[in-house]
Amino acid sequence: QVHLVESGGGLVQAGGSLRLSCAASGRTFSNTGMGWFRQAPGKEREFVTGISWNGGSTSYADSVKGRFTCSRDNAKSTVYLQMNSLKPEDSAIYYCVAAFGSGYSRVASAYEHWGQGTQVTVSS
């Protein structure tokens, strides 16, 4: 079993930055692909980013490419999401996810464990 705890969400003005963290415990974190999804009120859950087990490969949704950066520290069993140039449309609950394997996917069903989510609100 893997337990994921997100932190770092909050309220920020448009153009600002936030850094989300996700601390993992349980299964060997260093062998596991990780990712972030988000869901805004009234909208479907969407893929934000994925990162491979060693951080060597990442992928981003077109809507966040160039603004968001995903990284991981396997020694700390933590994955990060640095969000810059935030827009009101980035407002959502952000979920940290752990994959079944060492890679990542844009598909939610590829992820075995989900955190409880952290709220990000961007004001205009």
Image (spheres, rainbow, N blue to C red):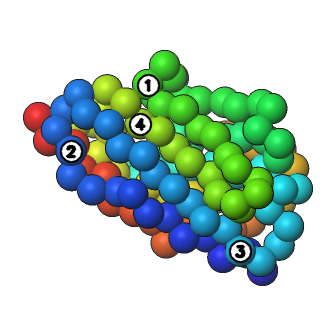
Instruction: Judge whether residue 42 can be spotted in this image.
Output: no
| Residues at marks 2 and 3 touching, judged by CB atoms closer than 8 Å | no
Q: Position of residue 43 (x, y in %)?
A: 36, 49
- The numbered mark at residue 12 is 2
Separation of disc 2 and disc 3 at Cα?
Answer: 29 Å
Separation of disc 1 and disc 4 at Cα?
Answer: 6 Å
Quarter of image, res 109: bottom right
Instruction: For mark 3, give the secondary structure.
Output: strand
**Residue 72 sits above or below residue 87 on the image:** below
Q: Earlier in the sequence, mark 2 or mark 3?
A: 2
Amino acid type assigned to the residue bearing label 3 in the image: Ser
Is 2 situated left or right of 65 in this image? right
Residue ID for mark 3 = 25
Amino acid type assigned to the residue bearing label 1 in the image: Arg
Q: Earlier in the sequence, mark 1 or mark 2?
A: 2
Instruction: Judge whether residue 9 can be spotted in this image.
Output: yes
Query: Would you call the spot at circle 1 few (<14 residues within 10 Å), some (14-19), or many (20 or more)?
Result: some
Separation of disc 1 and disc 2 at Cα?
Answer: 15 Å
Q: Position of residue 60 (x, y in %)?
A: 59, 30
Amino acid type assigned to the residue bearing label 2 in the image: Val
Amino acid type assigned to the residue bearing label 4 in the image: Met
Residue ID for mark 4 = 83
Which one is nearer the viewer's eye here, 92 or 24?
A: 24
Query: Would you call the spot at circle 4 few (<14 residues within 10 Å), some (14-19), or many (20 or more)?
Result: many
